Structure formats: structure tokens, C-alpha cells
Image: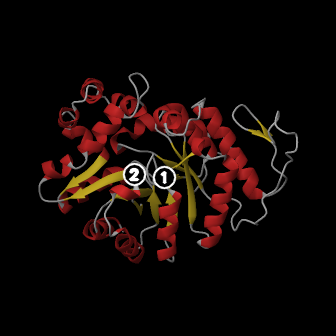
């Protein structure tokens, strides 16, 4: 099992991110990752990290697909891969309707259809085998109904790796199956190694649709909150606000993917309570309603020895890259000691 390091949203992380990144590279971490919602973007801080490092891979977890045209994403991926000497990992996701429609002003549409078209277009651009032409439900290239002057084009630069790895973020059944069918890696959030049985069938469904079956190097790469300290309860309390935000507030009633995930894990009553409290403005109570058991399933909290004892479950679940949300050099070193 390899280790990655997720810096999340740049503005919410420590000011010594570069020091942590350099230490992760020295320790033999596989990759550094950044995220975006509606604050800092994922690409700019990742480029900064890449410029300060030499060997470690750099990836987006994730770039929001509806926020960028697929051709723009392919241009960005090709550019970063050239600048980093082949270290870039392209992580993509559809985000959620709350952000996509409320912030970007783009119709959320059909996420499965969008993802399939998007990945196909990005790969077509990077391969440079022919000029880009795609007429689908979400993307129409060259666009019809415009000036009529558009024509199929081919990427000017030659990508260093036309087959650079593409990862898909997914937690819903159909999205997980699509990631297994189309991508080189899967980026689940709030992943529980104890619930791998829930996901395994969806992964196998997607692998079955690939020519030649499951790819040998398919990367299962969940992001995992890591909080190391003597007091387990205090460590858990650093994780609970984020869980409450996503389970309670990232979406509307009946359209919250993270709430659905908690329900699939068996926390239906707790998920409903967290959402009721959060949406009624009682955020502190929503945080308090997050069960310790759920935190322990999806995060690594507590003393070094406790985390050591929790790690075998992640390996047994088939995790190949554990992307840690570790916010200090000390925690980064501890995880390297325990895993690498």
C-alpha cells in the first residue's frame, strides 16, 4: 500500500504545506493531491507544489468536470505532465448540483453520461490520432448552431504521455462501476474498508465491461483523514465537523450523495438526524450527532499504536494508495513509519 498526501482546499490548510510536501517526497510518498469546491482551484496550488518538488507525483482530487470543457482539461493535463516530467495524475469528478448549478451556473445534467463523454474527449485530445470531433448529449464539438466557422482541431503540443492516468471520484453504485470501466484509478471519499463488500460488486461490474478484464494497475485510492494524538475523542472531534458538513449540508434532502453513503453503511437514523440538524442551522448539534463508530470506519484517529492496529483492514480491502489528510510534518512522518 502506497501513501499519498491530500492538501484539500488550499486556503483551509496549514501555511507550511511546502515543508510537508518536501518531507513526504523525502519519505517516499507516492503522490500529492489538491481539491476544489468554490474557493481555491485545484490546479494552481498543485502547480506550486510540483514546482517545489522533483520526484513525487501530483494529482487533482478532483477537478470539477462541469466547471471546465473537456478540451481545456486535456490542455491542462498535457501541460502539467510536460512541466513535471510525467508526474501528473488527472483526477476528475462531477461534484454535486449544489455547487455546479449554484456556483458555476451550469446544468448538472446526467452525471454518468457527462463522465463517459468527458473521459472519451480528454483521451481523444491526448492521443492526437485525429482532430477532435464529438457530438453527444452534453458536448457538441465543433458546436452546431454557432457561426459555422468551427472546425475539428488537434492538440498543438505533443503530450509526454498520451495515456496519462485518469482517476474518477465516485461513491454511488453506478458511478463506481463507471470508474472501474473507464478509469485508471478510483478516488472514493469517506471510504470504509469494512464496507468493501458494498463496493466490490460495482467494481466488478465495471471491470467486466473492459476489454481484457480488470487492469492490473487499477488504483484504489481513498482519501483518509489522519489525526494522531493521545486522546482518541479529541482526534475524532477534528473529523466530525467535515462529516457533518457533507452528510448534513452538501446537498438537499433526497439529493445528498454523502448522506446516501452513510445510509448504505447502516447509519440511516444517524444520517437523517445529522441532516435535520444541519439544515435547520444547528451545526454544532449536527457535529455532536456524528457517531464515533462512523468516524472510526472512515478515518484514522488516536495514538500511533491504535492507528497501527487499524491499518491491516485498509490493506485487506485492497487499497493500493492511501491518500492521507495529514496536516503536520509529524503526522506525515508517523504514517510513513507505519505504512512504508
Q: Residue at x 24, y 59 (%)?
A: 308
Q: The residue tagged with tag 1: helix, strand or loop?
A: loop
| Residue linked to disc 1 | 61
**Left or right of 25, for residue 138:** right
Front position among marks 1 and 2: 1
Q: Residue at x 41, y 37 (%)?
A: 197
> Picture quarter containing residue 195?
top left
Position in image of residue 158 (x %, y %): 76, 66
| Residue linked to disc 2 | 223
Name the image quarter holding the C terminus.
bottom left
Q: Is residue 143 above or below residue 159?
A: above
**Is there any visible trace of residue 209 in the rendered image?**
no
> Picture quarter containing residue 154?
bottom right
Name the image quarter holding the N terminus.
bottom left
Disc 1: CA contacts within 10 A as few (<14), some (14-19) or many (>=20): many
**Is there any visible trace of residue 140 in the rendered image?**
yes
Amino acid at each position: 500500500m502506497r501513501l499519498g498526501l491530500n492538501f484539500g482546499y488550499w486556503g483551509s490548510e496549514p501555511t507550511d504545506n511546502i515543508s510537508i510536501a518536501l518531507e513526504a517526497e523525502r519519505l517516499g510518498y507516492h503522490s500529492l493531491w489538491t481539491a476544489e469546491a468554490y474557493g481555491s482551484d485545484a490546479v494552481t496550488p498543485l502547480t506550486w507544489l510540483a514546482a517545489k518538488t522533483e520526484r513525487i507525483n501530483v494529482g487533482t482530487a478532483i477537478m470539477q468536470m462541469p466547471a471546465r470543457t473537456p478540451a481545456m482539461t486535456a490542455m491542462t493535463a498535457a501541460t502539467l505532465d510536460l512541466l513535471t516530467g510525467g508526474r501528473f495524475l488527472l483526477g476528475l469528478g462531477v461534484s454535486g448540483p449544489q455547487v455546479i448549478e449554484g456556483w458555476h451556473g451550469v446544468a448538472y445534467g446526467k452525471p454518468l453520461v457527462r463522465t463517459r463523454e468527458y473521459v472519451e474527449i480528454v483521451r481523444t485530445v491526448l492521443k492526437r490520432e485525429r482532430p477532435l470531433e464529438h457530438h453527444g448529449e452534453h458536448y457538441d464539438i465543433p458546436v452546431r448552431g454557432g457561426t459555422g466557422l468551427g472546425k475539428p482541431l488537434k492538440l498543438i503540443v505533443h503530450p509526454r504521455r498520451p495515456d496519462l492516468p485518469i482517476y474518477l471520484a465516485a461513491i454511488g453504485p453506478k458511478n463506481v462501476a463507471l470508474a472501474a470501466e473507464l478509469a485508471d484509478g478510483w478516488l472514493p471519499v469517506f471510504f470504509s474498508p469494512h464496507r468493501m463488500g458494498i463496493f466490490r460488486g460495482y467494481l466488478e461490474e465495471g471491470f467486466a465491461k473492459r476489454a481484457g478484464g480488470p487492469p492490473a494497475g487499477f488504483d484504489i485510492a481513498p482519501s483518509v483523514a489522519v489525526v494522531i494524538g493521545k486522546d482518541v475523542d479529541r482526534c475524532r472531534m477534528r473529523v466530525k465537523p467535515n462529516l457533518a458538513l457533507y452528510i448534513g449540508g452538501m446537498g438537499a434532502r433526497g439529493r445528498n450523495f454523502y448522506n446516501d453513503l452513510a445510509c448504505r453503511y447502516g447509519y440511516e437514523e444517524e444520517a437523517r438526524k445529522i441532516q435535520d440538524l444541519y439544515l435547520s442551522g444547528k451545526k454544532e448539534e449536527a457535529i455532536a450527532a456524528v457517531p464515533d463508530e462512523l468516524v472510526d470506519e472512515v478515518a484514522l484517529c488516536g495514538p500511533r499504536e491504535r492507528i497501527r492496529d487499524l491499518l491491516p483492514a485498509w490493506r485487506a480491502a485492497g487499497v493500493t494508495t492511501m491518500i492521507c489528510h495529514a496536516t503536520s510534518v509529524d503526522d506525515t512522518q508517523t504514517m510513513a513509519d507505519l505504512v512504508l
